[in-house]
Every structure is written in C-alpha cells, then in structure tokens.
Amino acid sequence: DAGVIQSPRHEVTEMGQEVTLRCKLISGHNSLFWYRQTMMRGLELLIYFNNNVPIDDSGMPEDRFSAKMPNASFSTLKIQPSEPRDSAVYFCASSLDSHNEQFFGPGTRLTVL
Amino acid sequence: KQEVTQIPAALSVPEGENLVLNCSFTDSAIYNLQWFRQDPGKGLTSLLLIQSSQREQTSGRLNASLDKSSGRSTLYIAASQPGDSATYLCAVSPLYALNFGKGTSLLVTP
C-alpha cells in the first residue's frame, strides 16, 4: 500500500482565493483525520470522520473551512476565502478504526500571501 | 483539556549514547499513546503505539514505556546514530483524535 496520499504537496495562493487540499486514505481504513501544524500551536485536530461521516468538527477554525468525504477512500479540505493566517502544514491521517494507530500523509504546505 | 508536555525541547548527544525522551500528560483517561518521528519539512512517521492496557512496546533500538496512572511515557533510544536526528513527538488519544506535545528536537553528532 502506498500509504496516505496528499495533494498538492505545496500550495502558494493569494489572500481571498479558494484552496482545496486532497487526501486518499489507506485502503481498508475507516477513520480519517485532518490536522494542522503551525510553529505557534503545534499539531491540532481540525476534523474527524468515521465511515465517511463527520464526527467531530470542533477544531475547524471558522466557516471558511469545510471538509467532505464523498467516498470511503477520499477526502477534501476546502478553505474559501483563504487568509494569510491559514498558512500552515495540513496533514491527513487515517487509521483502521478510531482507536488504532494513525498513519500520516506527507502533508500540504500552504502559504497564503 | 488534555495537555501534553515533552521534555527536553531540544537535545544534542554524541553518536553511540543511549538517551531518554520524556512525555507527560494531564489526564490519565486515554486509549493509547503514540510516538512519532518528524524529519524537517516532512510528515510524521509512526514509531510505536502503546495501548492503555500495556506498559511498554519495543521496536529495534526503540523502547517506549507508559505509566498511565502518573501520566508519563518515555522513549528510550539505544546506541544513537546520526540518522536518528529528527523531532520526536508524543501524542495521546483520550477519545479518537491525538493530542500532541510540542516535540523534542534531537541532534546526534558523529
């Protein structure tokens, strides 16, 4: 298995633009997590899906952020409109179920100018 | 809210030394604890997972222990090598998501 796949690896955009980050889970995993990493706050959970259903989105900063899981293997995280303070590394992780080992993708480094 | 603290924040050792990285957490009600390695500009690589009912896990030169009642975990690295240089992150799972510490940045010098 190729592991968790994220795209793009790097994204540079201007303030106000829409950004879409993509994640492909490890086959057979039913839990999907989006995390954000910044120097100031470290790694924080944004949203958690189980069996394609959002279970906890309390970490999503505001309405500008939305996440979907249209099928069992794919998820998107969208920011519209983007702001400079959204600049961070966004990680997607998957696990066999909610209490198992989590495997992380390589991350998307987002820079909003 | 679960707080995870890692000490020291940075560590530099000569090659060959055995070393211990520390992690503490404030709420003992956890499902598991996971240690990760992160290389600069890269993603997180899972090193060891300890379930709440376990006391330790071993993988090669790595050994992680868990004392849930006191809210502590240690990661022991034997015979350190320059290739071990990275940031090591401890994370606990009180429900499903991981709560991360800020990490220990390790430098192993030849």
Image (spheres, rainbow, N blue to C red):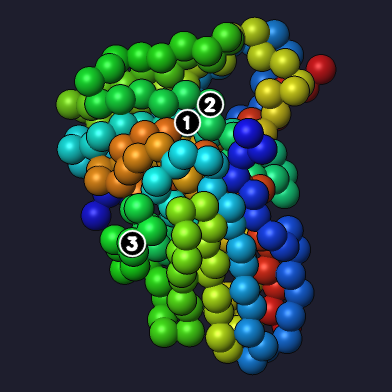
Q: Provide the residue designation for mark 2.
A: B47
SS of the residue at dot 2? strand
Q: Nearer the viewer, mark 2 or mark 3?
A: 3
Distance Cα–Cα, label 3 vs label 1? 27 Å
Q: Judge from the rendering whether residue A85 lies leftward or rightward of residue B42; answer left or right.
A: left
Query: Above or below — where is B53 with respect to B25?
Result: above
The answer for which chain carries disc 1 is B
Q: Are marks 2 and 1 in contact (CB under 8 Å)?
A: yes
Specify the quadrant of the image occupied by residue A53: bottom left
Q: Along the line of sight, which residue is nearer the eye, B96 or B77?
A: B96
Q: Nearer the viewer, mark 3 or mark 1?
A: 3
Please name the residue that numbered disc 1 is placed on. B35
Rendered-image quadrant of the N terminus of chain A:
top right
Mark 2: few/some/many CA within 10 Å (<14, 14-19, 20+): some
Q: Amino acid at mark 1?
A: Trp
Residue A79 at x, y percent in the picture: 55, 79
Q: Earlier in the sequence, mark 2 or mark 1?
A: 1
Disc 2/disc 1 C-alpha distance (Å)? 5 Å
The image shows residue B66 at horizontal and vertical percentages of 31, 21
**Same chain for the residues under marks 3 and 1 in the image:** no
